[in-house]
Image: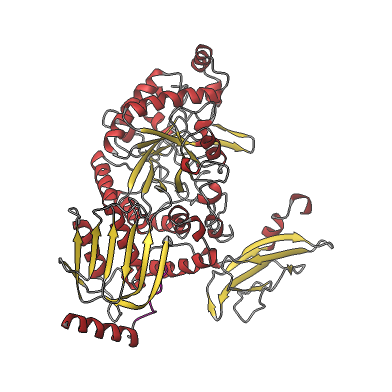
């Protein structure tokens, strides 16, 4: 009775008082959007001493410790009790609606109740609870003068897909074990359950293979260069090869456990037969042209010729499918990889394999004659089928990029479709399982706004486009699309702050595409929630791209050959102000209301966005010459 009275009083207080320091009423802005959500009146106010009951879950310590750690910021002391005001119950009778990862969450003024079939559901309910609390819960330092309360709500939530992935390229630039753990923490907050680690490439081999020590003695190290990766000056012999690193097998075991505690599986990728210069620098006999090159791990110098009609390698960065030593090598690698990663799948890459050195190889010619292979795609397919057998012999499933389709797909292969959705559709029509991770919607290494303001990359993917990601095309059997994934390639990502900038907010969009019901998508509603999460990231000091607040530009010419510029923003309640006189505009400058004709002698268009009286975008200087260069060729 006394307890009830106290709860009631604190509820009254919470509903009526404005407390200094309380930045805003907590609003419901959960990402990814829950499957079903019913808001109720009132709030649950967290007491200073929070009792938590966890029932039927023997391994519940991690949940309790996580709650306790998070709520310590609020000065709230968490203890276990059989009569907690927060209760987590692991269902004895399986509830098919919520499945293995779902949960139900009921927040009333008196209590918070969570039910789940499996521990993963409890963990995801906890993430939702955190998101219902004020943003200050994300602060690194203790926060005082806050009403620690959350809105009353009933949620029933479960994922749309079992495979909710983020790929992290730790090969182009090495990231430490701690940095990978931080990445896992952030992805788990948004209910991702799959970390795809791209562990090998031309620039580094990042996993210790005990039977092949040179892979990390030689293959993990290159020359440190900064600037725009891809066109660095080739290293000279005297430049130290001390940039890079690798994970020892103990590191990998710790990472696997760290991820498992957060209900994340790790998918290891060993990218073969292309992208293999680090392996070849370690063991040159693995290429079709051993001894022809002084192989060195790439330091970001140009090694490929890319063109609209295909590509070739300037240096042989491919394993030789005609060489038995390659399969012995891969057997050793996959034996150790399979033993380290409990996840059912191993990713074998297969992308962007240049064939020009194979074309010159007598060993490949003999292989083609012997095996009746008609072209070099069939040579790669021959290779993939042999690798598939190795993977299956280790008790694992074989997954690769969509190039593994070319020349004939290995019987049990799972395809990760990256060159658009096409490869995935083709594979699904052949009855193969597919993970969709198309460049068009899910490439986190692309720029998020205009190239005049973003760190340069060769393509752009804005948040509103990422939010359109729909993993299941109409034309295929939906059961074969096991999920979706966003990929962070790290050629231009040198540190974790920039990594965060590239991942967020687009990983919010992809999280919603792979978790929330298809019909729950609503850009305007999502964008509002994104802004709430920006505020949470500000508290957490996690970097994100503010590019949604900056305009996009399109350019054309009038009938009288004047240059015409149109601007738009992804967020619809912003105003754009501009100048052509080289000064920085603010909200007292002309407001953009429609297409602009560029004055004849203008050198720059400068723009800034506001929401009402508040400056929100970044100062952008768009050179007129740059605009002219974007005109269709005939119009320049
Ligand atoms: C890829 O982006 N090369 C898979």
Considering every residue shown, the one lying at the far right of the view is 560
Numbered-mark total? 0
Task: Examine the structure image and report whether residue 24 is included in the region drawn in magenta.
Answer: yes
Q: Which picture quadrant has residue 465? A: bottom right
Q: Which residue is located at x 39 percent, y 31 percent? A: 279
Q: How is the image coloured?
A: secondary structure
| Image location of residue 414, percent across then percent down | 44, 35
Horizontal side of residue 327 vs 93, given as left or right: right
Image quadrant occupied by the N terminus: bottom left
Q: Which picture quadrant has residue 328? A: top left
Q: Nearer the viewer, residue 338 or 499?
A: 338
| Image location of residue 33, percent across then percent down | 43, 62
Q: Nearer the viewer, residue 486 or 273?
A: 486
Q: Which residue is located at x 26 percent, y 51 percent? A: 261
Horizontal side of residue 211 vs 627, given as left or right: left
Query: Is residue 70 positioned above or below 407 on the image?
Result: below
Image quadrant occupied by the C terminus: bottom right
Horizontal side of residue 378 vs 515, given as left or right: right
Query: Is residue 407 positioned above or below 457 on the image?
Result: above
Q: Which residue is located at x 71 percent, y 60 percent? A: 555
Write down the region rendered in magenta: 22-29
Query: Is residue 634 positioned above or below 306 on the image?
Result: below
Magenta-colored segment: predominant secondary structure: loop
Considering every residue shown, the one lying at the far front of the view is 93
Task: Examine the structure image and report whether residue 259 is included in the region drawn in magenta.
Answer: no
Q: Nearer the viewer, residue 590 or 536?
A: 536
Residue 18 visible? The answer is no
| Image location of residue 348, percent across then percent down | 41, 34
Residue 422 visible? The answer is yes
| Image location of residue 173, percent across then percent down | 40, 46
């Amino acid at each position: 009775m006394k307890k009830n009275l106290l709860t009631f009083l604190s509820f009254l207080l919470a509903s009526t008082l404005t407390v200094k320091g309380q930045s805003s009423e907590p609003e419901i802005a959960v990402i990814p959007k829950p499957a079903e959500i019913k808001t109720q009146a009132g709030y649950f106010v967290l007491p200073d001493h929070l009792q938590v009951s966890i029932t039927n879950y023997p391994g519940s310590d991690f949940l309790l410790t996580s709650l306790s750690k998070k709520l310590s910021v609020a000065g709230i002391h968490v203890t276990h009790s059989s009569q907690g005001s927060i209760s987590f119950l692991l269902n004895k009778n399986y509830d098919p609606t919520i499945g293995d990862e779902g949960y139900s969450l009921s927040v009333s003024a008196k209590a918070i109740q969570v039910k789940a079939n499996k521990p993963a559901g409890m963990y995801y309910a906890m993430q939702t609870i955190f998101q219902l609390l004020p943003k200050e819960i994300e602060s690194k330092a203790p926060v005082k003068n806050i009403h620690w309360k959350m809105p009353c709500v009933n949620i029933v939530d479960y994922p749309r897909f079992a495979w909710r992935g983020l790929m992290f390229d730790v090969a182009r630039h090495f990231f430490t074990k701690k940095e990978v753990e931080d990445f896992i923490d952030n992805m788990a907050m948004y209910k991702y359950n799959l970390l795809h680690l791209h562990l090998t490439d031309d620039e580094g081999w990042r996993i210790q293979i005990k039977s092949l020590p040179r892979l990390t003695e030689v293959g993990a190290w290159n020359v440190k260069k900064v600037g725009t990766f891809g066109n660095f000056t080739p290293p000279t012999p005297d430049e130290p090869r001390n940039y890079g690193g690798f994970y020892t097998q103990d590191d990998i075991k710790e990472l696997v456990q760290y991820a498992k505690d957060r209900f994340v599986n790790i998918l290891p990728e060993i990218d073969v037969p292309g992208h293999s210069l680090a392996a070849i620098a370690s063991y040159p006999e693995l290429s079709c042209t051993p001894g022809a090159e002084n192989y060195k791990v790439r330091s970001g110098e140009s090694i490929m010729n890319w063109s609209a009609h295909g590509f070739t390698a300037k240096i042989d960065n491919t394993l030789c499918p005609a060489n038995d030593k390659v399969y012995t090598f891969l057997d050793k690698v996959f034996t150790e990889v399979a033993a380290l990663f409990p996840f059912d799948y191993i990713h074998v890459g297969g992308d962007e394999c240049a064939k020009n050195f194979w074309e010159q190889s007598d060993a490949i010619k003999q292989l083609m004659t012997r095996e009746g292979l008609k072209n070099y795609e069939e040579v790669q397919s021959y290779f993939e089928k042999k690798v598939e057998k190795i993977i299956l012999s280790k008790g694992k499933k074989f997954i690769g990029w969509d190039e593994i389709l070319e020349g004939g797909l290995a019987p049990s292969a799972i395809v990760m479709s990256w060159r658009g959705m096409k490869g995935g559709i083709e594979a699904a029509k052949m009855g193969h399982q597919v993970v969709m991770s198309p460049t068009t919607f899910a490439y986190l290494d692309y720029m998020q706004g205009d190239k005049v303001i973003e760190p340069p990359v060769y393509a752009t993917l804005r948040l509103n486009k990422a939010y359109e990601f729909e993993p299941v095309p109409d034309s295929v059997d939906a059961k074969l699309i096991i999920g979706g994934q966003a990929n962070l390639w790290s050629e231009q990502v040198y540190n974790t702050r920039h990594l965060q900038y590239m991942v967020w907010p687009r990983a919010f969009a992809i999280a919603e595409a792979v978790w929330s019901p298809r019909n729950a998508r609503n850009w305007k509603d999502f964008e509002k929630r994104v802004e709430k999460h920006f505020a949470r990231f500000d508290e957490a000091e996690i970097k994100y791209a503010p590019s949604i607040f900056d305009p996009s530009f399109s350019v054309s010419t009038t009938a009288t050959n004047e240059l015409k510029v149109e601007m738009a923003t992804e967020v619809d309640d912003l105003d754009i102000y501009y100048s052509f006189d080289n000064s920085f505009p603010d909200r007292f400058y002309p407001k953009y209301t429609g297409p602009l004709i560029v004055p004849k002698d203008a050198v720059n268009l400068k723009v800034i966005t506001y929401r009402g009286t508040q400056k929100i975008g970044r100062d952008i200087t768009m050179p007129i010459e740059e605009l002219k260069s974007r005109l269709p060729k005939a119009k320049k």
